Each structure stands twice: as C-alpha cells, then as structure tokens.
Image (tube, rainbow, N blue to C red):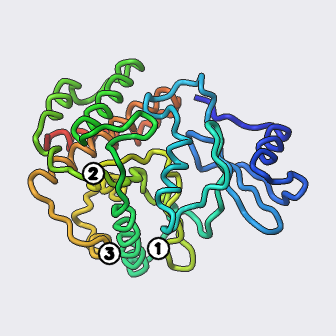
Amino acid sequence: MTKRVLSSDELDSVLKTCGIDPAEVRVREELAEGTYNTAYRIRTADAGYILKVAPDPASPSLTYERGLMATEAVFYQEAAGLPVPSVVHAAPDFLLMTELPGKPWYPQKLDDDLTAKLRGELGTIVAGLHRISGTGFGYPQMGLHDSWRSAFRAMVTSVLADAARYSVELPVLAAKISAALDSPAFDDVATPVLVHFDLWPGNILIDDSRVTGLIDGERAFWGDPLAEMVSLALFGDIRKDDAFLAGYGPVRFTESASFRLAFYKVYLYLIMLTEIVPRNSYDAAMHKLVTKNLLAAAAQL
C-alpha cells in the first residue's frame, strides 16, 4: 500500500473545499507518524488543523479498512466533550480537524510518578468514552449488528478471510479461532459503547503533565469496553495497571470477561500480522513479538 501524497495544487483545492484560503496558510507540512493515511499539519495565523487523506481506494487493504475516514469523523463527533479533535470538514477521502496541544506519549520517556498520574487521568477519560452508547454493535463502515456476538463474529471472520486472501501464515489455526466464537461469554455484552481500539501511547497526546488528546480514532467501533483494554496495555496486561484502573473505575475480570479480553488480544494481533502484507511493512522483531503474544492469548480460548 502506498500512502497518497497530495501535490501543492491538490492540497490547495482540499483547503478551499474546507473553507480555508490557501493564501492564509502559514504552515503546511506532512507528518511522518501515520502508516495508513497521510496527515498534514496546517496552520493559519488564527488556528491549527490536522488534515488526513485516505489512501487510494484501489490500493490493497484489509476489509474493515474501507471507509475508515468516515468512522474517524463519527468517533470525534460522538466523543465531543472529551479531549478529541473537532471535525471541521469531513469527506469520504479526507478529514480536516482541529489540532490539539501536546505531543504523542510515545516515544517520550517519563518518570514513574508522572506516568502513574497520567495513567490515572487517562483512565478517567476512557471511562467517559465508554459512557457513550450507540444503537448497534460493530464497525460503522461495515454496518451495525443487533448483538455483540454477531458483530464480533463478523469482525473476526473478516480478518481471517483477509489473512487467507493475502496468504498470511497464521501461528494459530483459523478453525480454532472460529470455534471459540461460539462461547456464551459474548452474550454478556448488552450495551454497545464507543471503543477507540487503538489507544497505544502513540495515539495519546500529553502536554504540561496532562493528557491533552486521544487521536487517530479511525479504527473505532461500537462494542465491549473490555476490547479497549488491549491496546491500552499493548503486549501487556491491563489488570496490572493499578493507576489506570483507579482512574477508570471498577472492572470485574470474571471468567467471562477474561475470556473475552484474551479473544480481543487475539483479534488485534491477527490484524497486526495480516496488515503487514498489504502495507508491505514486515519487521522481523515486531512479527516475532506479535506472534508470541498471539499464541499466549489464543491458549486462553
């Protein structure tokens, strides 16, 4: 997959569509952090914006990645009131939003006391996110379902089909994963809440010893709040994050909850192993780490 880079004229045209006069733009620079969309920082004398541009629709991608730009706009609109960008203009292939203060938590190095403070603050913010409920379950761009069981089955089946389509060699049999979807544990999820699902430190902004933003909400869905806990403790265990849980509030890790948490890890790691093919982004060390964690999570199913 090749990220779509706009020419100067194309960028001017997008800005005009968004109601911004290109002549008033003082800063326009491409940001290097993203691996899927192309992002630009746009600043005028009065305001700062982030413009995200979707890849060419003809480029290879995973099934659920079609229409991500619209889902990101939905996430920010639904989460208004929390530290998320405000949508300025949304289109199928680009999104202009306000720029938030701060820098990504990763790769900053913080001392233990500040880390604990910020994790507690993050827990409170995420708890607020999970108080936002929707009318159905699943990815907005894939169509909502009446039950979490149905939605999550479609999500997992989709990425397994993508793995087969791209000839990805998975360390766990697809049949084992599919069989585990029959667990009654998914029936315990009755309310679809807003889940970011990509809250690793690179998508959390901090500034002046406070959490200032949750960004890159394109992979959001309506579902089980426990699914959020995977990226929040990527390659780790949220149950050991006392500071975050103190801010978030009580979570009962019952047998059902623990099973679902393990399955959500499996799902995320399946995505991470599969997406490297269409993105042409193989990294041996990361592949080994993801594989190790996928096997450990799958052993709990």
The residue beneath circle 1 is 110
Amino acid carrying label 3: it is Gly
Q: Answer with left or right where residue 70 lies relative to residue 249.
A: right
Foreground pick, 170 / 194: 194
Task: Please identify, in this view, whether the residue under mark 1 or under mark 2 is nearer the observer.
Answer: 2
Residue appearing at x 38%, y 24% in the figure: 162
Q: Answer with left or right where residue 237 lies relative to residue 91.
A: left
Q: Considering the numbered disc 2 on the image, is that residue within a helix, a strand or a loop?
A: loop
Foreground pick, 205 / 154: 154
Residue appearing at x 63%, y 28% in the figure: 56
Task: Please identify, in this view, whether the residue under mark 3 or under mark 2 is nearer the observer.
Answer: 2
The residue beneath circle 3 is 247
Alpha-carbon span between mark 3 and mark 1: 19 Å
Residue 264 image offset from top left, x and y in percent: 27, 45
Residue appearing at x 11%, y 38% in the figure: 183
Residue 248 image offset from top left, x and y in percent: 30, 70
The residue beneath circle 2 is 224
- Kindly check if marks 1 and 2 are in contact, taking CB atoms under 8 A apart as contact: no
Residue 209 image offset from top left, x and y in percent: 51, 79
| Mark 2 crowd level (few <14, some 14–19, many ≥20, 10 Å Cα) | many
Choose the circle earlier in sequence order: 3 or 2: 2
Amino acid carrying label 2: it is Asp
Quadrant location of the C terminus? top left
